[in-house]
Amino acid sequence: MERERNAVSQVGTEEYQSPLVHITSFIVHAQPGTIDLIGAAITRIPGAEIHCASAAGKLIVLLETTTLQDVIDANRRISAIAGVLNTSMVFHQVEAADELDQVI
């Protein structure tokens, strides 16, 4: 569980801890005509944003959280929104927060 909260990295001979960031994307299938309402509900979820949406009823949702439980909870909240037919996770990556600012 400690790994869930912090990543231990080594710089030289010193160890330090950095919070983890979970980066996740979902495809949300919704009833056509409900995209605006569903999009508004999704953007009220902490860390969630709509990357794109189609009138046919598909949304791509990006989610950035600090724990896996937050990812699970967000998925459940999205799935429970009226008009959502299905939510599929298509990407999940965990990184140390301080490593996200490094130039590759």
Image (spheres, grey):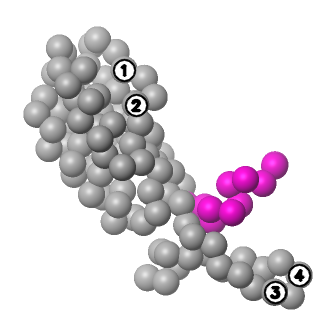
Against 57, residue 44 (above or below) is: below
Residue at which label 4 appears: 12
Horizontal and vertical percent for residue 25?
44, 42
Tell me, for residue 53, which label it has, or none.
1
Q: Verify CB contact (< 8 Å) between mark 4 and mark 3.
A: yes
Task: Indicate the position of residue 41 as horizontal and vertical percent values.
Answer: 23, 35
Quarter of the view holding residue 93 = bottom right
Report helix, strand or loop for mark 2.
strand
Residue 9, by quadrant, is bottom right
Amino acid type, residue under disc 4 in the picture:
Gly
Residue at mark 4 to residue at mark 3: CA–CA distance: 6 Å
On the rendered structure, is 53 left or right of 101? Answer: left
Write down the residue under mark 3: 14
Q: Which mark is residue 50?
A: 2
Neighbourhood count class around disc 2 (C-alpha, 10 Å): few under 14, some 14–19, many 20 upward? some
Callouts 3 and 1 close, C-beta under 8 Å: no
Q: Is residue 92 visible?
A: no
Q: Amino acid at mark 3?
A: Glu
